[in-house]
């Protein structure tokens, strides 16, 4: 991931339009007009070899004739001319281009990228609406109208969606900081822009219209960074199968399974919504700064019917009505008419004036078991709805920490109260269901944000390394035989190697041997056909349960063999499996599995199992790596979790065992890239634990490209201890929860000290910058911290790799009170070793020449130091090969 030269896109000093046209209505004419009308305070230049002026502005015959160097170019010329123009612009020093032109083939796209590469030039598009930045007065697009200025950034793969949103937002007085129409995303994509906008002070929230994600790990890393800094809200096209096909056709890339996108957005701390209208409703709600910890809502209304509608919407959406405590009910009894509802929803009757609203709200703010209050009002002839809104504002001032949402019903008489509430930062909605959806989004957003702090490492398996190695050898043997499907015994052996409880299974090649196996087991058994070509055995009569006698097993095996031979004459029958019939009458049947998504790689599935699993359709998906918190969150998102919690005479299932099974599956797909599909169905779960009754595993040779997870695990293998003046200090990869201690380190050091060590790499560390530095992908970027167990980190070293991993930039910072004791040497040694392991032949950094200590340390490690006679900066370079 890189934000390199994106500054030239968002903050140019001069812009050139190549392809400016005098023909009214043409793209080149509309873009020229929009550029001049945008309010940009820098230079605007037009290139047209057949015109001397356009719209009263001079035109230049070629790029070489421009009077100043452009930072940003907007290109609207035929596709075959673009690569040459990019090369020429690069020579001039231009570092960003927006290519509006459509109709590129794959060869032309590659030519364009090849032309840009020597100059590290960034390209937006091609096939896009253009780039708009109301914050900077830039309108390099052919949009039909000028957007308003505000704090929302919009990133859209569709130009048509972008113009529709601009039109819709202007009618509702909603403004933008930046709007990027991304087109084909040949270079600049969501990952690049999210990473840049995370630190953009003009942007308070980021909205995405996405059709597909190109590079999963890059997107996840950037999304997690941005979501830590500000709300990121997504509309993803292609929820339905038909929609997914349309998206693939439109963008030229295959769309991943929608449920996987859900999981990815959730893990990235984003909020996914369904419609474009929801984008702005969610942005308003999240920008209010409200935070909720759970889904319990208190509803206050002057109309009983409104309260019922809101309560219905809450239950349907998975929320809960807050239960009023006796003390709160007593307070309400004292201040409300005797006809009030007596419970939540709190109906204070249609004649409620502002004073009654104020008394009721004052009492309800003391309810500890409520996460937010929804205040609703319907117009009546005996009360003033503005008076009611004023009451809400008075309570807000006294109880600023209580999250409140509002819903003033109507149209003709509600403009003023809605304006008052909105101006005070209280989100207001037109209908009860919209207000309830907003509350549930707050809860979902808080839940997703909590997942950002989870940094699972490679899990410790309950089984030995030897058993895990045996599982990998078993799979290698299957592939060597030319098979892709493991038999049931083989699949269960793999599960057992990762500590997943299985039912003991005996293989029998004939009905006679199956009878003998049943006699040895001595209890009722399950009999299943064994064939390498048959995965869903019950579909062909290949499963018989609860067979009580060995003789019955023999007869069942003969009948099964005859039927399966008729149903699947193409299949080779290897025999049967015989296993003890597990009788756990209170157990819940679960489905656990893994699959490889085309975009996000390995995914973990959890849901309601059994033969009707497709009909019940109760499942959720998570991305590995998992830890206990992430696994439990997956369980909680399903309806079957209510059964697992216990009911009537059924004890709660052992959730810890289910969680450990999910974590084991996560580790299995991390360790064994050959596993492309895995089903455990059913996994029986009850108070006594879990057991896998059946398993199915599909394998294939990994592709030549490196096997990659969408989220790299926290690399615990890099953690080690160093001794500094007799003190043991842990050197380990940074974690998101280090943000506070990192900020404390920077605050203790002061700006001059940071400037001396980091130059312009990190000239100052704000809380947002500290959070950004702690939220990395552990791939393109690595930060190792020195942790002495104190409230302030002892130091850190940061590496940022180039996209091809041939080189990396390095920066080191050590706390002032322990400087000169050898910690800097230890950190630099760790960084250079890691860079070498990743294949980087060169590590470099820029230092202030006044920083003598750092320069001496660099020379101690054999760095080449290039000092400049005209600059106060020295470039140090290490060879790691």
Image: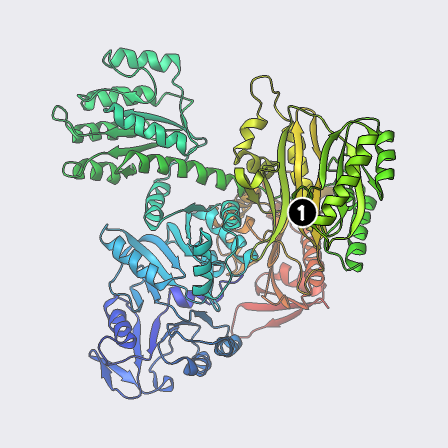
Q: Mark 1 points at which residue?
A: 678
Camera sees residue 625 = no
Quadrant, the N terminus: bottom right
Placement of 483 over or under 56, stated as above or below: above
Looking at the picture, how far across and down is residue 508, in whole percent? 84, 41
- Residue at point 65%, 30% (across, down): 685
For this rendering, which residue is in front, 88 or 835? 88
Q: In this view, does 461 lie to the left or right of 182?
A: right
The quarter holding residue 345 reads: top left
> Percent position (x, y) of residue 59?
27, 83
* Foreground residue among 386 and 743: 386
The local secondary structure at tag 1 comes to: strand
Q: Which of 824 and 540 is in front in this view?
A: 540
Residue at 31% x, 13% y is 331
Bin the neighbour count of mark 1 within 10 Å (Cα to Cα): few under 14, some 14-19, many 20 and up. Answer: many
Image position, residue 196 (x, y; %): 45, 58
């Amino acid at each position: 991931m890189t934000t390199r030269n994106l500054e030239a896109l968002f903050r140019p000093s001069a812009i050139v339009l190549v392809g400016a046209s005098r023909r009214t209505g043409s793209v080149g004419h509309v873009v020229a007009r929009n550029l001049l009308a945008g309010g940009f305070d820098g230079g605007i230049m037009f290139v047209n070899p057949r015109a001397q002026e356009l719209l009263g502005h001079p035109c230049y015959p070629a790029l070489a004739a421009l009077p100043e160097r452009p930072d940003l170019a907007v290109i609207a010329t035929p596709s075959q001319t673009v690569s040459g123009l990019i090369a020429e612009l690069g020579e001039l020093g231009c570092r960003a281009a927006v290519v509006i032109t459509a109709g590129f083939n794959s060869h032309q796209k590659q030519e364009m990228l090849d032309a840009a590469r020597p100059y590290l030039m960034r390209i937006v598009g091609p096939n896009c609406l253009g780039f708009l930045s109301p914050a900077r007065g830039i309108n390099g697009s052919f949009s039909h109208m000028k957007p308003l200025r505000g704090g929302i950034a919009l990133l859209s793969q569709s130009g048509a969606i972008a113009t529709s949103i601009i039109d819709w937002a202007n009618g509702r007085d909603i403004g933008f900081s930046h709007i990027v129409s991304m087109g084909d995303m040949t270079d600049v994509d969501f990952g690049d822009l999210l990473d840049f906008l995370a630190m953009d002070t003009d942007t308070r929230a980021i909205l995405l219209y996405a059709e597909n994600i190109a590079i999963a790990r890059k997107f996840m890393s950037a999304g997690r960074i941005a979501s830590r800094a500000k709300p990121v809200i997504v509309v993803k096209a292609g929820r339905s199968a038909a929609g997914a096909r349309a998206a693939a056709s439109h963008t030229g890339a295959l769309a991943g399974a929608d449920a996987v996108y859900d999981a990815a957005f959730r893990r990235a701390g984003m909020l996914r919504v369904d419609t474009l209208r929801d984008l702005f409703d969610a942005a308003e709600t999240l920008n209010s700064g409200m935070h909720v910890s759970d889904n319990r809502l208190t509803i206050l209304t002057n109309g009983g019917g409104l309260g019922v509608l809101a309560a219905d919407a809450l239950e349907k959406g998975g929320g809960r009505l807050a239960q009023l405590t006796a003390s709160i009910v007593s307070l309400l009894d004292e201040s409300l008419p005797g006809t009030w509802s007596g419970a939540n929803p709190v109906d204070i009757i249609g004649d409620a004036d502002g004073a009654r609203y104020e008394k009721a709200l004052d009492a309800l703010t003391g309810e500890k078991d409520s996460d937010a209050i929804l205040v609703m009002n319907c117009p009546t002839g005996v009360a003033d709805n503005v008076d009611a809104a004023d009451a809400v504002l008075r309570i807000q001032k006294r109880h600023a920490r209580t999250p409140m949402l509002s819903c003033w019903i109507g149209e003709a008489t509600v403009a003023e109260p809605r304006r008052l509430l909105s101006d005070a930062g209280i989100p207001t909605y037109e209908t009860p269901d919209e207000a309830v959806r907003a509350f549930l989004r707050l809860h979902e957003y808080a839940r997703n944000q909590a997942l950002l702090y989870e940094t699972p490492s490679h899990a410790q398996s309950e089984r030995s390394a030897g058993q895990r190695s045996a599982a990998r050898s078993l799979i290698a043997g299957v592939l060597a035989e030319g098979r892709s499907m493991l038999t049931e015994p083989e699949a269960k052996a793999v599960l057992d190697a990762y500590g997943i409880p299985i039912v003991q299974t005996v293989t029998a090649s004939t009905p006679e041997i199956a009878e003998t196996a049943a006699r040895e087991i001595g209890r009722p058994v399950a009999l299943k056909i064994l064939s390498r070509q048959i995965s869903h055995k019950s579909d062909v009569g290949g499963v018989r349960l609860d067979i009580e006698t060995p003789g019955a097993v023999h007869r069942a095996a003969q009948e099964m063999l005859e039927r399966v031979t008729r149903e699947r004459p193409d299949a080779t029958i290897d025999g049967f499996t015989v296993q003890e019939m597990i009788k756990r009458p209170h157990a819940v049947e679960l489905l656990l599995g893994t699959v490889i998504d085309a975009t996000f790689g390995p995914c973990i599935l959890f849901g309601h199992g059994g033969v009707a699993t497709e009909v019940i359709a109760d499942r959720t998906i998570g991305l590995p790596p998992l830890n206990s918190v992430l696994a439990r969150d997956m369980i909680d998102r399903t309806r079957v979790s209510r059964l697992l919690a216990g009911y009537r005479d059924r004890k709660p299932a052992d959730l810890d065992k289910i969680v450990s099974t999910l974590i084991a599956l996560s580790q299995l797909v991390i360790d064994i890239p050959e596993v492309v599909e895995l089903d455990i169905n059913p996994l029986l779960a009850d108070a006594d634990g879990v057991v896998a009754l059946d398993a199915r595993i599909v394998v294939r040779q990994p592709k030549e490209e490196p096997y990659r997870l969408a989220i790299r695990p926290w690399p615990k293998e890099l953690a080690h201890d160093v001794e500094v003046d007799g003190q043991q200090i842990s050197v380990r990869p940074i974690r998101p929860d280090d943000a506070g201690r990192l900020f404390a380190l920077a605050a203790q050091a002061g700006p001059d000290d940071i400037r001396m060590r980091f130059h312009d790499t990190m000239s100052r560390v704000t809380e947002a910058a500290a959070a950004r530095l702690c939220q990395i992908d552990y791939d393109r970027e690595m930060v190792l911290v020195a942790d002495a167990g104190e409230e302030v980190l002892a130091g850190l070293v940061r590496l940022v790799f180039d996209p091809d991993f041939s080189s990396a930039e390095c920066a080191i910072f050590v706390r002032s009170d322990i400087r000169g004791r050898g910690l800097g040497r230890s950190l630099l040694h760790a960084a250079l070793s890691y860079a070498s392991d990743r294949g980087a032949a060169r590590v470099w950094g820029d230092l202030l020449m006044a920083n003598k200590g750092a320069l001496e340390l660099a020379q101690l490690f054999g760095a080449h130091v290039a000092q400049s006679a005209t600059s106060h900066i020295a470039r140090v370079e290490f060879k790691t090969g």
